[in-house]
Image (tube, rainbow, N blue to C red):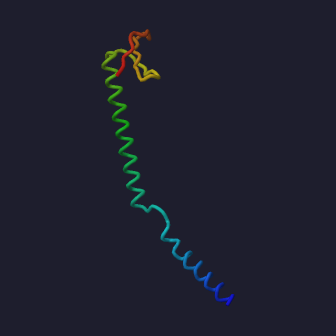
Amino acid sequence: MNHAINWGLAALAALVLSTAYLLDGPGDIQAAIDAAADAKATQTEQRAQARFEKAAQQMCGENSGWARLENGAVQCFTKRGKKTSKVQL
């Protein structure tokens, strides 16, 4: 009787281990979908940054420099580095 239980447990363990290949996680298709989503998010972020930079440059003037402050405002500078105005976008 004891040998039958041991053989049954061994067979059950073999069955579980033999199905482990089905649990390999995301495949190549899911990896490609994730990579495309990451690329799209990066592209959207870059476009938003470019729009912000263009708007800040237009608000400060063509020949002016600008810096983004911690609170999200933009500090405009003259070409000689003097602070002129703060702009909130």
Q: Residue furthest front?
A: 1
Q: Residue at x 55, y 75 (%)?
A: 16
- Vertical placement of residue 71 versus 14, above or below: above
* Left or right of residue 25: residue 54: left
Question: Where in the figure is residue 63, as x and y percent of width and height?
Answer: 34, 15
- Vertical placement of residue 44 versus 68, above or below: below
Quadrant of the image occupied by residue 28: bottom left
Question: Where in the figure is residue 53, as x and y percent of width and height?
Answer: 36, 26
* Left or right of residue 60: residue 18: right
Q: Quick one: 45 or 22, which is closer to the camera?
A: 22
Question: Where in the figure is residue 19, as x and y percent of width and height?
Answer: 51, 74
Q: Residue at x 39, y 56 (%)?
A: 32
- Vertical placement of residue 11 versus 34, above or below: below
Q: Quadrant of the N terminus?
A: bottom right
Q: Residue at x 48, y 63 (%)?
A: 25
Quadrant of the image occupied by residue 3: bottom right
